[in-house]
Image (tube, helix red, strand yellow):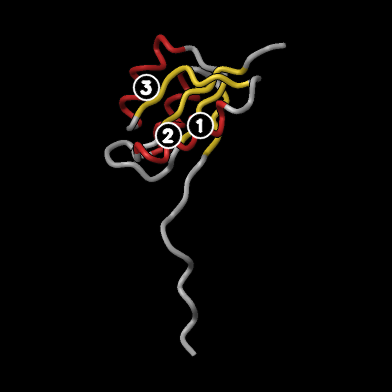
Amino acid sequence: MNVVKVFLVEDEPEVREVQRRLLGKNPRLTVIGEASSGEEALEALSTANPDVVTMDLLMPGMDGLEATRQIKDKYPDIKVVVVSAYGGLAPRAKR
């Protein structure tokens, strides 16, 4: 059985913890590293060698979109999955 190596990129520590726990329940996945910013992710990926990166879009500094572009340029074989949420519900139309 091949194990998929996952690297988490998320600026909120609590969200990274939830992701790590959920992914850890699947024996075919292993979290090999994590970063709290796009810059940190790019630095870590030079040695981490994951199969998949989960990427938050809304982060301070380099956002997830730019980090994804740079990751795909430098490491085209790494798959990037965007995992992001925007707080709250969509505003209701005025009645």
Amino acid type of the residue tagged 2 in the rendering: Glu
Q: CA distance from mark 3 to mark 1?
A: 23 Å
Quarter where residue 44 is shown: top left
Question: In the rendered image of this protein, does residue 67 appear above or below residue 75?
Answer: below
Q: Which mark is residue 21?
A: 1
The relative height of residue 42 versus residue 67 in the rendered view (above or below) is above
- Earlier in the chain: of badge 3 and badge 2, it is 2
Measure the C-alpha gap from mark 3 to mark 2: 20 Å
Instruction: Look at the numbered discs 2 and 1 and tell me whether their residues touch, using CB distance below 8 Å.
Output: yes
SS of the residue at dot 2? helix
**Toward the viewer: 9 or 12?**
12
Give the residue at the far right of this rendering: 1
Q: Position of residue 55 (x, y in %)?
A: 47, 35
* Label 1: which secondary element: helix
Left or right: residue 5 compared with residue 42: right
Q: Tag 1: Cα neighbours inside 10 Å, few (<14), some, or many (≥20)?
A: few
Residue farthest along the left direction in this orientation: 61
